[in-house]
Structures are given as structure tokens and as C-alpha cells.
Image (spheres, coloured by chain):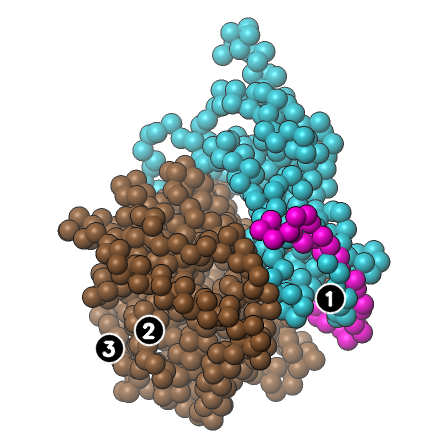
Amino acid sequence: MLKHDVLVIGAGLAGLRAAVGTSTRYDTAVLSKVHPVRSHSIAAQGGMNAALANVEGSKDDTPEKHTFDTVKGSDYLADQPAARKMCEQAPLLVYELEHWGCPWSRLENGKIAQRPFGGAGYPRCCYSSDRTGHVMLHTLYERAVELGVNVYEEWLALSLAIDNGRIHGVIAMEMATGRLEMFAAKTVVIATGGYGRLFARSSNALINTGSGIALAYEAGLPIEDMEFVQFHPTTLYGTNILMTEGARGEGGYLVNNRGERFMQKYAPSVMELAPRDIVSRSIQIEINEGRGFNHEYVHLDLRHLGAQKIIERLPGIRDITIDFAGIDPIHDPIPIQPGQHYSMGGIATDVTGATNVKGLYSAGECACVSVHGANRLGGNSLLDTTVFGKLVAEAIPQYLGSGAGEPNTKIIEAALKREQELIAGILSRTHGTETVGTILSEMKETMFNQCGIFRDRKTLEKCFGKIKELKERYKNVAIQNSSSQRYNPGLMNTLELRGMLELAEIIVAGAIPREESRGSHSRTDFPVRDDQNWLKHTMAVYAADGPAFSYTDVEITDYEPKERKY
Amino acid sequence: MSPKNGNTDLQYIFKIFRFDPDQDREPRYDTFHKQLPYGTTVLEALLNIQETDDDSLAFRFSCRSAVCGSCGMLVNGTPVLACRTQLAKLIGSQVLVEPLPNMEIIKDLVVNMTPFWESYRRIEPWLHTNGDNPPKQERLQSPAQEKKLDPYINCILCACCYGACPVLGFDEEYLGPAAIAKLFRFMTDSRDQRGLKFLEKVDRRTGVWNCRTIFRCIDACPKDIRPTDTILALKRKLTLYRFKKFFRLI
């Protein structure tokens, strides 16, 4: 049995920031199914919001205004004290990363540059060309190397050992050998990111299975607001690789097959820089009504920006379109369509990242504080990861200092035994009638087509039935080659698919009763927001026959909900 | 390439390196015949084989968009990222897929990258400061100073250069191209205060001097980083540093 004071699951921005924060005082380790720099944070392009007031046109920007934009962007479902906390912390985190070596793009006066982003009243998005996640993740990894943070690379966390409302440890598999190991830990941080791969069209990395959320759900923690799934307006047609909002922030146009900048109709005052939920719906309406190309996509046109600006500010976008679509945005418009991008929901936490289990914390995309409510603003997720990673690292010493007991090894041993039995069960099914591949692809198509950008009761109920069917069929999955457990993708995919099906069920089952349209949850049968009945958070708790739902109030302290217009 | 433009499927024969040290006495090559649409990448083909033919086939992947550095491997003998390698751009219909050289095999196409990360740590890959408290806000850096870093911060640590380097084939103590390029990135940063003295740590055969300027790393880099240029630049810096030190100019 391995022992640590703090065990962080996930090595993206949130996990690394938490580990960097606790490692100077406590025995801290990070456990991740990929090497830290392979985490999906690396793919973030556009930037990180902070009211630095560095650029012309943002001189009177403040964290207060950033808070308001975040709350309005969330369609008033964000908890306002949490959003305020995040926006107040934002400048500190940008400066901290700079001090650790982050190569932010700069203004002529040497200060950090900022660009306009969707749903923001000021240019407040700090960036490093269009590779912001890349430079931030490398900077935090460099900091972790400097501090000697212990990393278990390529370990898959399988379950949490919880008893009597307290965390005791984690069971994980070393992928290189297939060996199961017990980790005793006084505190555990879940920072495993989102679940994009539940959906057929997703901008997310292939590793984004939502496994940490599923671990928490299966351990009985409440999972909040999962029906709110962000669809990014501009993913590259064919592969759904992200085309940053920064492309529009730099002045890119969205154009339909008649050559019209159609956002004029939907958000005349901010055009292409409306929040993501609105732009995604607008694009999908254009496509559905025959004004797209091949009934599949519209154009993101950057040509008028000129070669120099594209090469300087959007080099990563250009690389991607050349490599994956064979087109150069200097000369051709980019074919784009909306794709799943972000999970607003996740493990319910308070504003320090604490869950309702003592010693168990969560931060980043897998957590729901809630700061993003029903729709996250672009530039607020890199912010969320670092702020809440830091706040978790600040909360843990308080908990450990107030007499957190030693982990109970019996609880961890019992958890190990359950995992061993589960895996033995999978390996013993040598003649299953189902494969991971078929169930996964049916789930993805179902979720995208029936629980996607536009929803209605009839389709959602169909989706729910299909997910239930897939959960049944999952019981007959057998892996093809079980002779060796060493780095066995068949076994790992089978283990992860179970959790993915659970999350799919929470999303669709939570979407059915919410009879309103709010942020990313857009019901064609209930097109209006209903604050009377639905200004509340959804909480899903595990039960044998499917999630049990309850609802909690939204913390509204400063801004009364108003109609959301742009 | 996408958008998929209706071209008919193409026939490929994949020969894939297989080795499980727990079961196999020696490596073998498995053959898979696949019909795949125009626009399929090597990574997509491997995922397809894993899904339909053999779910024990091991390889690394994550972003599938050439930014995470997971899927470095040899395709027809050349180190590449599998995710950005279009099958249609390869010559012929036979596709030979093997792990990156210069590292031990964990299984199939998955190699043990520990030596690569050890080299990376040896150059102390973090911003060195003199210990003063940083300012409350950002340190200033001009756009020109920041742009100097651009070619090097783009490194995704995929180890394609490490696999391509012929020196690492016989001298596993050598730092290798990626680590040296990373050192150059920090020494180029106007905010880094490690100073020329730090170069003493790489002033040895296993530091910068073992590079034979064969330029394989430049060919292999999927991000156009040109590690050899940084190695030559550090060799020049070191020569100047030794000269100055000898004449007690510093």
C-alpha cells in the first residue's frame, strides 16, 4: 500500500496547480492516466480571462464587471459568490503564472496582452498566440518538476475508498503492468477533466471520458447540473478539432452559403462574439434551414485579417487546418460546425473545492462549484482550473491541520477486493456478445443526435431508453485478448465505458424534467427560461436503478436575473 | 483529408510491430488488411484496428490534433506523430508501424520514456530567478523578447527527435535534442537569470558536445523547432564562456 497526505487524480492545469500548492508542505503525489503534458488542458487555445485592464479599451475593466459578464453568460445559474471569488482571483493567477515563466503574449509597453472574447464587455482574455493551454500546462509542469512533485504516470484510478463520509484512499491500476495498487491518502483531489467523448462530435481529446466524475458518482457523491453541456460554435468540420474563439476575437467572420454574416440576425450588437450557446444555436439553425454548406457546416472566414495577423496570432489554427483539412486560412474560409466542448456540470463542491465527503476535493472541469451555470464564457475555463486548483491547495492545510485522522486500511483493502472481483468478472467473459467499440459508438451518436444542441421531451426519452439498453448490453461485453494485463487497452476501455454510460444517463435523465431553455440546455418544446420553477441546481445521486434527483437553490447575491440579450 | 469529399475507400496493408515482454520471447509483426476512407490518419487506422481486430494493440494517444505529443512512432521508418500523418500522403499501400527507437519497449508501440524525461530534468527546465520576490504584477517583457521564445515554446515533448537522434543509439547518457532545445528556450528568455555559468553543466560529451550535427532531429520535429540550431548556438556560447573564463574576463 502506498501512502500520501495528498493524492491528486489528474495532471492537467487544475491537478498540477493543486499539487504545486500543497507539495511544499505535505507529501503530495499526482496520479494520471497520461503523462501530465498529454492532458487535455494542452489543447486550450484562446486564453484566460482576468480584468488586468492592460489594453486600450479595457482601462476601466474590473473583477466586478468580469463577475457580471460571467453571471449573465451563465444565464443566471452560476452561484454568484463563487463567480465573484474566481474573477477576483484571476489577476493573481495570471501574474503567478508569469512569475513561473509563462510566456504570455505582450503589448508594446511590455505588459501582458489581452484580446476580446465572447460575452465579455472588455478585451480581458490573456493569451499566448493561440497556444495558451499549451504554455500554461508546460509552465505548471515545469514548476512541478522544480518542486519535485511525485507523479504516477499512466495510472488509471478505478475507485474511491470512502467510509462514513470520509475519504481513505484510492484504488488504481498501473497501466504498464496491469497491477492494481492501494493508495492510502488523507486527502484526495479529483481533477480529471470533462467527458467530451460521450458525444460523437467533440473537440475534446480522446482521453476525456469523465472518469473522475464517474468515480465520485459511483461512490455516492452528488453530481450537479450535468444536463448543461457546452457545444463550441467552431470545430473543424470532419475532425471537430477546436478552432479557437480567439479567431473571432481577432476579427474572424461567420458566413453562410449566401455570403451573409448571419450573426447580424441573432446577436446584432456583438455579432460573432456572442456567448457560445447563442452562436452554436445560430450556426445550427443556419445549417438546419439550408443556409449551410452540404447541410453540414458554415464558414469561419479569416482571410480579411491578412497573412501577418493570422501567422502571428493564430499560428496553431493555421497548422491544424493545413494538417487536418488541407486548407490554409490565409487563402480559404474554414469549414466549421458546432461540437461538444465543455461540461458545465460535475462533482458538486463548495467555493473551496470541498465535496460533501471529508478530505475529498475536486477542481477544474470535472467539478461544479458552480461558476459557469448553464453556459461557460470562453476564457473562463483556464481561469477556473488554476483558481480552484489553488483554492483547493489552500483549503487542504486547514483540513489536515484540524486533526484529519489516518486512513483506515481495512476500508481500502475492501475497495481493492471489489475492484479485483469486477476485473476478474470482465476477464472471465471470454465469449461476450458485445464489444466496447459498438456500445461506445452507439452511445456517442445517440448523445449527440438526441441530447445535443436542441432538445425536446420525445427525443430525450428516446435517448434515455437507448442509454438504458446500452447499460444492459454492457454486461455482455467481453474483451478479445485477456491473456496479458500489461498495457491492455481492451481492459482499460471496458472499465471506463461503464462510467461513461453512467454519466450519459445522468445527463439525459436530468435534461428530461428541466422544462425550460437556459444557457446550453435548449428545449424546443419549452423555449423560454423559467425562473419561477427552474432557477435551481440539479443534483444527481447514485441509485441502483438510475440517478435520484433533487434540487438546490442558486446563490443570487448581487445580480437579479434579467432577460439575457446581446 | 476532411472535409471528406466522397472519394472511394483505399486498401492498405498494415504491418505493426508487436511485443509483450510478459508473453513474447521476441517481437513480431502482425499484418492487418484494411479498407479506409480518404482522409484517414495513421492514428485513426490504429484505433480502428484496436476496435475491430485486436483490442490488445497498445499505443499512446490523447489530443489527436498534434499538440499533446503522445503518438510519436515510426511510420515507414520515419519518426512522426501518428495523428497528423495522412495515409494518403504515404507512398504505396503498405504501412509499416514501429515504436520510436532509442527507448525500451513497454508493449507494442508504447516505449519507456524515462530516459527522455530524465534528460529533460537534467537541464532544470524551469525559469531560474535570483530569489527576489517577484513584483506584484507582471514582469515586463517586450514583444520582441517574447517572440524570440516562440520557435522553442512550441515544443510538445513528443520525443520524435529523441527517437531520430543517431547519437542516442550508442550513447544513452547524451542529453538529446529536445532537452537542449528546452535549455536554449530558458537561456533565451529575458526573465531567466541562470547565467552563462549554468552552461558548465552541459559542457561535456554527454551534454552538448556529442551532437554530430547530422540534423535528423530537424527532419523529425513535427513542430519545426530545429534543435540542431540551438545545440550549435549553445556550443558557441560555451566556447565564448570558456575563452572569457580563461582570460578572467568574467
Name the kind of residue labelled 1 in the image: Gly
Name the kind of residue labelled 2 in the image: Glu
- Residue at mark 1: B39
**Is residue B36 in view from this perspective?**
yes
The image shows a total of numbered marks equal to 3
Name the kind of residue labelled 3 in the image: Asp
Q: Please determine whether, in this image, residue B137 is positioned above or below residue B248.
A: below
**Is residue A56 in view from this perspective?**
no
In this picture, residue B105 sits left or right of residue B145 = right
Q: Please determine whether, in this image, residue A113 is positioned above or below residue A525.
A: above
Disc number lying in front (2 or 3) = 2
Q: Could you say which chain is coloured cyan in the image?
A: B
User: Which residues, given as a range, are shown in magenta?
Assistant: B1-29
Please give the chain letter of the residue carrying mark 2.
Answer: A
Give the alpha-carbon distance from disc 2 to disc 3, as whole Å: 12 Å
Q: Position of residue A255 (x, y in %)?
A: 63, 73
Helix, strand or loop status at disc 2? strand
Q: Please determine whether, in this image, residue A270 is positioned above or below residue B187.
A: below
- Residue at mark 2: A224
Dominant secondary-structure state across the stretch colored magenta: loop
Mark 2: few/some/many CA within 10 Å (<14, 14-19, 20+)? many
Helix, strand or loop status at disc 3? strand
Q: Position of residue A283 (x, y in %)?
A: 57, 77
- Residue at mark 3: A553
